[in-house]
Amino acid sequence: MNLPSFLDVSPGLFFWSIVNFVLFIILLGKFAWKPIVGALQSREETIDAAIRRAEEANVEAQKILKENEEKLAAAKKDMTRIAQQGREQAEKTIAAATEEAERIKTAKIEETKAAITREKEAAMRELRAEVSNLVVIATEKILKEKIDGEYSKKVVDDVIAQIPTRN
C-alpha cells in the first residue's frame, strides 16, 4: 500500500521531534516559565488591586451620592419651609395693609361726615340769620306803611320769594 508522502512517518524524524519538544519544554521551564508566571501573577495582582480600588471608589461614590441626596432633600425641605414662611409673611403684610386701609377709609368717612355736618349747621345758621334779617326788614316795611292786610301779605310773599330754595 502506497501512502502519500506527507503521511509517511520516519522514525528518525519522530525521535528528533520528541527530543526538540522536550528541550523546548526544559528551556521554556528554565528561562521563560518563571517570568511568564511572574508576569501573569503581577498582572493578576494589578487587576485585583484595580478592582479593589474601583470597588472602594464605588463605595465612596455611593456614600457621596447618599450624602448629596440627603443634602438635596434637606435643601428642598428648607426651601419649602422658607417659601411657606414667605407666603405667611406676605399674607400677614396684606392683612395688615388691608386693615390699615380700612381704618384710614373709616377715618376719612367719619371726617367727611363731620365736615358735612359742620357745613350743614353753618348753612342752617346762615339761613336762620338771613331769614331773621328778612323778617325784621319785612316787619319794618309793614310798620312804616299803613297797616294794610293786602300789603302785609304781599311783603311777606316777597320776602319768602327772596329766600333761596333748597334742593
Image (cartoon, grey):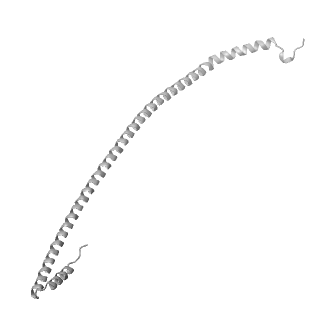
Direction bottom: furthest residue: 145
Is 124 situated above or below 108? below
Is 116 situated above or below 133? above
* Residue lying at 79% horizontally and 14% vertically, measured from the top left: 13
Horizontal and vertical percent position of residue 80: 37, 42
In this rendering, position of residue 4 left or right of residue 65: right
Please tell me in which quadrant of the rendered image residue 82 appears.
top left
Q: Where, quadrant-wise, is the C terminus in this rendering? A: bottom left
Please tell me in which quadrant of the rendered image residue 18 appears.
top right
In this rendering, position of residue 9 left or right of residue 42: right
* Residue lying at 48% horizontally and 30% vertically, measured from the top left: 58
* Residue lying at 72% horizontally and 13% vertically, measured from the top left: 19
Q: Which of 131 and 65 is in front in this view?
A: 131
Q: Where, quadrant-wise, is the N terminus in this rendering? A: top right
In this rendering, position of residue 80 left or right of residue 52: left
Q: Nearer the viewer, residue 126 or 32?
A: 126
Q: Which of 105 and 53 is in front in this view?
A: 105
Is 66 situated above or below 1? below
Horizontal and vertical percent position of residue 61: 46, 32
